[in-house]
Amino acid sequence: MIKWTAELVAERFSEAAQTAERLPPMRVQGYFNCWPDIQRMAWEKLGTEPPVYRFPPEPAAIDRMHETMRWVQWLEEEQRHLIWMRAKRYEWQKIAKRFGYCTRTAQRRWQRALLAVADHLNQGQAEFVTGHLSRASGGRPTHE
């Protein structure tokens, strides 16, 4: 059985965000026509951007993403936004500005939210292995 830590949970959320980004976009069917595509001149093609091709994620990655998305049900709404913003690699300053915190407070609340998920996964046995917060110290910073 895996001993979940805050770092493992953070990695899983990051992987889930990357997997979600690689999924094909949702499109409404809409209308279509049977006319052939318009053949453009070379000078007309200069302003167009090349299409973006993304490799689809593996089915196992999609399953892990769905499992990870279920974990956010254990968190409050603010914690959910905080974790997903960090998983999508937003800068700490932008995250802090979004919530009205200083940067360090945003980091501490992010760690606390990750610990809550790890705690739930371990059923009360989570520990922040290499970071500043640990369950043994009651959530207070420790010095290594």
Image (tube, rainbow, N blue to C red):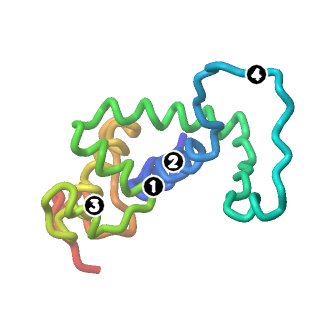
Q: Amino acid at mark 2?
A: Ala
28 shown above or below 7: above
Q: Amino acid at mark 3?
A: Ile
**Residue occupied by mark 3:** 95
Where residue 7 sits in the image (x, y, percent)? 43, 58
Marks 2/1: CA–CA distance: 6 Å
Marks 1/4: CA–CA distance: 37 Å
Where residue 1 sits in the image (x, y, percent)? 54, 40
| Pointer 1 with pointer 4, Cβ within 8 A | no
Crowdedness near tag 1: few (<14), some (14–19) or many (≥20) residues, C-alpha within 10 Å: some
First-in-chain label (2 vs 3):
2
Badge 4 element:
loop
47 shown above or below 22: below
Q: Amino acid at mark 1?
A: Lys
Badge 2 element:
helix
At horizontal 18% and vertical 62% (from top left) the residue drawn is: 137
| Pointer 2 with pointer 1, Cβ within 8 A | yes
**Residue occupied by mark 2:** 17
Crowdedness near tag 3: few (<14), some (14–19) or many (≥20) residues, C-alpha within 10 Å: many
First-in-chain label (1 vs 3):
1
Q: Quadrant of residue 57?
A: top right
Badge 1 element:
loop
Question: Given this view, does label 4 or label 2 mark the residue nearer the observer?
Answer: 4
First-in-chain label (4 vs 2):
2
**Residue occupied by mark 4:** 33
Which residue is more in the foreground, 112 or 82?
A: 82
First-in-chain label (1 vs 4):
4
Q: Amino acid at mark 4?
A: Asn
First-in-chain label (2 vs 1):
2
Where residue 103 sits in the image (x, y, percent)? 21, 70
At horizontal 29% and vertical 80% (from top left) the residue drawn is: 144
**Residue occupied by mark 1:** 88
